[in-house]
């Protein structure tokens, strides 16, 4: 038994014990991290520099790329360093920073994805009011509300989580520090406050999910009324990337947090954690650029300018 005041560091879960596999994980994570940096960096640069992309949809996409860069930079570099140097340790301050920033970026991303669903709803179901409902000022306010709500949410959770006494050691059953795994280390009688906050956050997340579902019900009803096949294709080409990102984000997170305890294991938890914390930030730029001709053209011109100037 140990008290939180005596804990100076935490021990993270490793991907492998063999040195060769540790180095393999380092190179694999390095490749994924560089791909995420390149993809999201290109999208941010293209949207910022290309005037034809200065529309609400691409403005929100720029914010999504910023959040993806933040979330993957919170977890992957430390995991790479641990694999490279064959260590499991992370300082208390480093663990608190991971909890704070990862929860912040994930919360803000969920709120932003909800706003992006509203953007697609207005664009397809109320196109005549699009300029009014999604003016430049309104877009800035909505993006700021997503970032601000995520910040408020994570301040409450992080402060409450790390104020709890820890009586179950310092071994975190995950490759990065995360609130549910820190709570497992707390005294059995002391985590009820944080459970209450988690229930409130879960209700908010469920509300966002319901809003996204209802938005797409209205979008699909509107699209099915479009008489031309070209209109169908144009509408679906702007909605499918967002719907794919939302599905991947929600399904992996739900499986991670709601999977039956009977099938839970350290190896499965590691795989699922990679699926919801590492893969989406690297895959989102590819998903958005595959079916978006404007974005593909802008990225191609930007790449040419970088390579041949």
Image: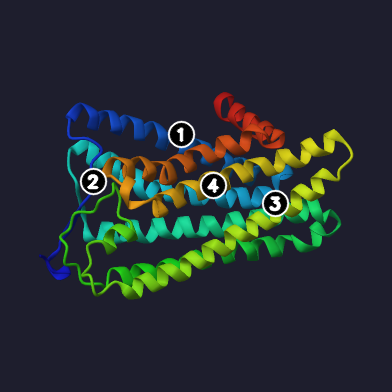
Contact flag, marks 1 and 3 (Cβ < 8 Å)? no
Tell me the CA gap for discs 1 and 4.
13 Å
Tell me the CA gap for discs 1 and 3.
30 Å
Can you tell which mark lies on residue 216? 3
Q: Nearer the viewer, mark 1 or mark 3?
A: 3
Give the structural element (helix, strand or loop) at label 1: helix
Report which residue position mark 2 lands on.
13
Q: Nearer the viewer, mark 1 or mark 2?
A: 2
Report which residue position mark 4 lands on.
65
Where does residue 34 sit, x and y in percent of width and height?
42, 35
Q: Nearer the viewer, mark 3 or mark 2?
A: 3
Report which residue position mark 1 lands on.
35
Sequence-first disc among 3 and 4:
4
**Res 301 visible:** yes
Where does residue 207 sit, x and y in percent of width and height?
58, 64
Tell me the CA gap for discs 2 and 4.
28 Å
Contact flag, marks 2 and 4 (Cβ < 8 Å)? no
What residue appears at the point 31 percent right and 68 percent down from the top-left corner? 161
Where does residue 36 sit, x and y in percent of width and height?
47, 38
Sequence-first disc among 1 and 2:
2
Sequence-first disc among 1 and 4:
1
């Amino acid at each position: 038994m140990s008290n939180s005041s005596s804990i100076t560091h935490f021990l993270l879960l490793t991907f492998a014990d063999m040195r060769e596999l540790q180095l393999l994980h380092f190179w694999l994570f390095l490749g994924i991290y560089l791909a995420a940096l390149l993809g999201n960096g290109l999208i941010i640069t293209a949207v910022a520099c290309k005037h034809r992309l200065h529309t609400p949809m691409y403005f929100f996409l720029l914010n999504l790329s910023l959040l993806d860069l933040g979330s993957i930079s919170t977890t992957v570099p430390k995991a790479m360093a641990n694999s490279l140097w064959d260590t499991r340790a992370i300082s208390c301050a480093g663990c608190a920073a991971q909890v704070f920033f990862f929860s912040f970026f994930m919360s803000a991303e969920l709120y932003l994805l909800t706003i992006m669903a509203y953007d697609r709803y207005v664009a397809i179901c109320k196109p005549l009011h699009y300029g009014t409902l999604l003016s430049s000022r309104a877009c800035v306010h909505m993006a700021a509300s997503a970032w601000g709500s995520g910040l408020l949410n994570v301040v409450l959770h992080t402060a409450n989580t790390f104020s709890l006494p820890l009586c179950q050691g310092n071994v975190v059953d995950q490759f990065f520090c995360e609130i549910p795994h820190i709570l497992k280390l707390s005294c059995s009688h002391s985590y009820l406050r944080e459970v209450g906050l988690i229930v409130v956050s879960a209700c908010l997340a469920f509300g966002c999910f319901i809003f996204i579902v209802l938005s797409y019900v209205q979008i699909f009803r509107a699209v099915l009324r479009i008489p031309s096949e070209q209109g169908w294709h144009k509408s679906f080409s702007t909605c499918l990337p967002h719907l794919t990102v939302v599905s991947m984000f929600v399904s992996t997170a739900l499986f991670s947090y709601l999977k039956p305890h009977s099938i839970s294991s350290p190896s499965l938890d590691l795989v699922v954690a990679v699926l919801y914390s590492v893969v989406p930030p690297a895959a989102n730029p590819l998903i958005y650029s595959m079916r978006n001709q404007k974005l593909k053209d802008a990225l191609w011109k930007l790449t040419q300018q970088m390579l041949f100037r």
